[in-house]
Amino acid sequence: MAQALLIIDIQNDYFPGGAMELSDSLAAGGKAEELLGAFRARDLPIIHIQHLNTRPGATFFLPETPGAEIHPCVAPTEGEPIFTKHFPNSFRDTPLLPYLEENGITALVIAGMMTHMCVDTTVRAAFDLGLSCTLAHDACATRDLAFAEQRVAAEQVQTAYLAALGSLFAEVVTAGDIIARL
């Protein structure tokens, strides 16, 4: 079973000073950087996903802005594919699935941002496509949400989404656990 590291939307707008700052983005970015280094050191496949927001009224990940650029902690190197997406699902209207099929990749190690949106949607889609997923929970970040005038803290959002994903769709472990298995 060939595996690849899939890095989803670790872009400048999610970091301090960005247009959509997430809780603990620096820590999560650091863990994603560790995973990236481990995959590079072992010459394992790496895929970067970059979200460019083209919907009317969008306020972050705007094309051709510094906020939409991939964060330096996980900057791609030559030869590492970058797939651009416009929806939360990294497979929707992108060449990701054909790329995985052409390269015999059947398992994904996933790190990324936002856990409750693009990470969740991509993991569930990958599962539906028959791929095996391992999610590095400490290499993901989210933010506070609100529903019916109730604030839901980022820590609770993160815990709820990771619990749901880990119940069926992915193995949810630390970046360190993943690196130890490589």
Image (spheres, helix red, strand yellow):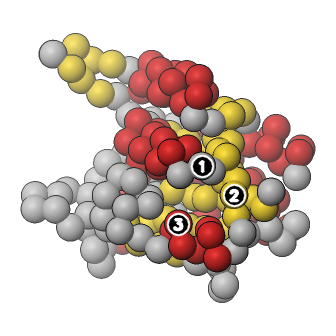
On the image, numbered disc 3 is attached to which residue? 97
**Which residue sits at x=44%, y=61%?**
91
Instruction: Check disc 1 and give the amino acid type.
Output: Gly
Which element type, helix, strand or loop, lies under badge 2?
A: strand
Which element type, helix, strand or loop, lies under badge 1?
A: loop
Label 3, label 2: how far apart the Cα atoms are: 10 Å
Image quadrant containing the N terminus: bottom right
Bin the neighbour count of mark 1 within 10 Å (Cα to Cα): few under 14, some 14-19, many 20 and up: few
76 vs 24, nearest the viewer: 76
Give above or below for 105 relative to 127.
below
Task: Indicate which label's residue lies in the foreground, 1 or 3.
Answer: 1
Query: Which sits earlier in the primary sequence, circle 1 or circle 3?
Result: 3
Label 1, label 3: how far apart the Cα atoms are: 11 Å
Residue 53 in picture, x, y percent from top left = 26, 64
Q: Is residue 143 left or right of residue 4?
A: left
**Which residue sits at x=42%, y=44%?**
121
Q: Is residue 24 left or right of residue 74?
A: left
